[in-house]
Image (cartoon, rainbow, N blue to C red):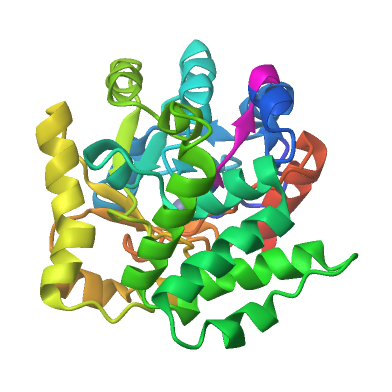
């Protein structure tokens, strides 16, 4: 441990998405993520500088008497979206004796359909942005009267690739209502991706059998809503809230015969989350809920507003270490 000053009693949490092995990188090289090689380096850095904790320790930290020693900062690893990559990550972690939480949108297991953002990532990675926009246009044309107004926002010229992708993501997250978003993205998925890749679900997401194995490795499974919606900005009726938040917990618990006390908010920014009070009043069924607010989780942090940092594809272990130290020192 190299924390010289008095360390606060708390832990950081990280939220990983894509962890790409060689075959994933070769087949879908445009999907950005942490390479398996870099991920191994991250783990080495974590073991040198942090006290890796299990999900049960995080529970006990919030509700029981778990405390960190002086000069010790905890670290909890989590993975969002139920990506196929997480099976590889789970095995690497198990090899190092590390237990993590994997947050899964239940649509991938229950309906065998991909989560919204993953459709966007894979379709654009494989077929390019122009093709994606063509499919988007024909689907919008079918489902929306004022589709032209929307298509204008996405005009793609050389040099604005990232900007257009950000606009597409924003459009599906916040501008369309969640039912229409889902309908259109599933249409694009079927026509653009599933048509060419009959095994699309295995390419994109975890299978039930893989989840069983990950549980046997000692990992925990949490929920991430049913269809990966922004809970906070969706104005859900009680029955919809039940469908998106409560039923996923029941489904995971009944299917895998485990307890699932954890959820993470899709997208995870303040606008996407419920306040802890609201979540407790509406559900009373989770013990810990995670956002992507970049904070150190302390005893005083609400167990329903725990923070995490999302490592990017640019985060080498050195850079990640620096960012983690910044989070610890932030007042
Ligand atoms: Zn997510």
Q: Which residues are magenta?
A: 15-23
Q: Residue at x 30, y 38 (%)?
A: 112
Q: Is residue 10 visible?
A: no
Magenta-drawn stretch contains 150: no
Tell me if residue 295 comes above or below residue 152 in the rendering.
Answer: above
Q: Residue at x 49, y 59 (%)?
A: 307
Q: Quadrant of residue 126?
A: top right
Q: Is residue 87 visible?
A: yes
Q: Quadrant of the N terminus?
A: top right
| 213 relative to 86 in the view: left or right | left
| 10 relative to 49 in the view: left or right | left
* Closer to us: 80 or 26: 26
Q: Quadrant of residue 113?
A: top left
Q: Position of residue 26 (x, y in %)?
A: 73, 23
Q: Residue at x 42, y 55 (%)?
A: 187
| 134 relative to 190 in the view: left or right | right
Q: Position of residue 183 (x, y in %)?
A: 36, 63
Magenta-drawn stretch contains 20: yes
């Amino acid at each position: 441990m190299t924390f010289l000053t008095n360390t606060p009693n708390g832990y950081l949490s990280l939220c990983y998405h894509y962890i790409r092995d060689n075959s994933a990188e070769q087949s879908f090289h445009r999907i950005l993520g942490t390479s398996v090689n870099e991920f191994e380096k991250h783990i080495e850095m974590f073991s040198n500088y942090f006290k890796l904790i299990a999900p049960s320790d995080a529970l006990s930290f919030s509700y029981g008497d778990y405390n960190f020693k002086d000069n010790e900062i905890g670290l909890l690893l989590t993975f969002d979206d139920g990506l196929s990559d997480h099976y590889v990550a789970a095995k690497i972690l198990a090899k190092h004796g590390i237990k993590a939480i994997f947050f899964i949108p239940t649509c991938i297991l229950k309906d065998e359909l991909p989560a919204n953002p993953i459709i966007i990532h894979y379709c654009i990675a494989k077929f390019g942005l122009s093709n994606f926009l063509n499919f988007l246009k024909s689907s919008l044309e079918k489902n929306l009267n004022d589709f032209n107004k929307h298509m204008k926002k996405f005009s793609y010229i050389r040099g604005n690739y990232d900007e257009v992708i950000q606009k597409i993501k924003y459009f599906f997250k916040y501008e369309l209502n969640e039912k229409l978003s889902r309908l259109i993205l599933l249409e694009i998925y079927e026509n653009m991706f599933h048509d060419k890749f009959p095994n699309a679900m295995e390419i994109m997401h975890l299978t039930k059998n893989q989840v069983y194995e990950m549980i046997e490795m000692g990992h925990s499974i949490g929920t991430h809503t049913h269809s990966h919606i922004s809970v906070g900005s969706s104005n859900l009726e009680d029955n919809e809230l039940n469908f998106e938040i409560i039923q996923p917990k029941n489904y995971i618990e009944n299917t895998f015969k485990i307890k699932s006390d954890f959820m993470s908010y899709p997208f995870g920014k303040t606008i996407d989350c419920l306040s802890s009070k609201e979540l407790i009043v509406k559900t009373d069924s989770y013990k810990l809920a995670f956002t992507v607010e970049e904070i150190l989780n302390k005893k005083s942090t609400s167990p329903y507003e725990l923070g995490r940092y999302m490592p990017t594809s640019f985060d080498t272990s050195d850079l990640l270490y620096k960012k983690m130290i910044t989070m610890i020192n932030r007042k």
